[in-house]
Amino acid sequence: MRKFLTIISAAALTACLEPQPKPEIKQIPVSEFTIETLAKDFKAPWSVAETSQGYFVTERGGKLFRISDNVKTEITGLPDDIYVAGQGGLLEVAPAPDFDQSNELYISYAYGTSKANGTALLRTVLNGNVLENKSIIFRASPPKTAASHFGGRIVFLPDDTLVLTLGDGFAYREEAQNVNSHLGKIVRLTRDGGTPTDNPKLGGKPQIYSFGHRNVQGLAYDNETGNLWEHEHGPRGGDELNLIKPGQNYGWPIATTGLDYNGAKISPFKEYEGMTGPVHDWVPSIAPSGLAIYRGDMFPEWNGDALIGGLVSKDLRRIDLESGKSVSETSLLSDLEERVRDVRIDQSGAILVLTDDPNNGKLLRITPK
């Protein structure tokens, strides 16, 4: 961290301000909704995706399931090198935009060993209940030793490229500012793992799309506005919701509203010149996971708002977004007392929520009462 602090000017100390108090968060109870359990008995589920074949759900321990007509079927053929330890394991499942024709799935996971691990991206074809034609199209480098902060969220953009989130590796936080490392970055790839020619030219890793991230656990593209949103975990405080633009530096660990786990300051700066600050942040942390931008008819007053799962807060947060700015925050479903790992909007406009119980995770479908 010292090498970064030496470049900080005295004038920038004006940014070292205490955060302003935030208004009280409105609570909306479960009784306001109809909640249907689509599937249960998942062990530490991580990701859900809806397709014409049903719902796909990953378990971090290394299993992939399809839920169709109330039947849960395990999909086999996953890679042999899934590293299940700490926060690592099987992460996101993302159907290709042309899944109905291609049967292609993209799957992120932690690869490697305790001495050398990172985030990998698999491209594969589903044949019945088996994954075939498997190809590892990306591995984050350099590998690390920490079993934490793997990122792993996947989103396809309208130009048929995809973006993948990567964590900083916890003990490797300075790497988030190093554009010769994948750690603490969002990368953009072609569907075969190549580098789009219009990616930002930032350093030695041409896949980098944005940098200065900690551990990105939510990612969503809003087709109506063309905005790419992400959220990431802070340490003690400093969780962030960010509007992602190519080539921008999102500040970690130079600028943060969070403290280290021992209570020490990570940096004196809450914001810093030339770095992009969050649209919304949380102090204390809610441990956000899963992100959707609501578009649908079931909750028309929520159109364009962000829905964010809370692991520590055990709720679903709605951030009212107006012209790319956070206007207000609401807590939903807190009386369920469930950790929320993922959130999606289904084709009907209902909200899909994946709860994070290590032994009885559930896939819930939420509609207005």
Image (spheres, helix red, strand yellow):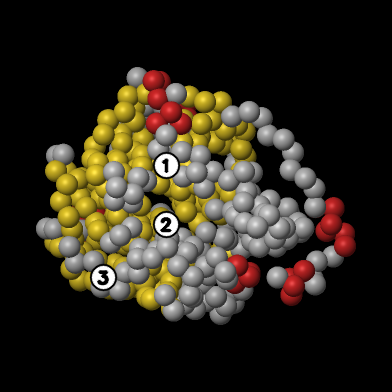
Q: What residue sits right under mark 1 in the picture?
A: 339
How far apart marks 3 and 1 lie (CA) works out to 28 Å
How far apart marks 2 and 3 lie (CA) works out to 18 Å
- The residue shown at (42%, 75%) is 114
In the figure, is residue 93 to the left or right of 13? left
Q: Is residue 329 above or below residue 183?
A: above
Q: Amino acid at mark 3?
A: Pro
Tag in front: 3 or 1: 1
Q: Amino acid at mark 2?
A: Arg
- What is the quadrant of residue 353 in the picture? top left
Q: Amino acid at mark 1?
A: Arg
Residue farthest toward the left in the current orientation of the protein: 128
Residue 31 x/y as whole percent: 39, 20
Tag in front: 2 or 3: 3
How far apart marks 2 and 1 lie (CA) works out to 18 Å
Pick whichever of labels 3 and 1 is earlier in the sequence.
3
Viewer-nearest residue: 193 or 176: 176
Pick whichever of labels 2 and 1 is earlier in the sequence.
2
Residue 124 x/y as whole percent: 24, 66
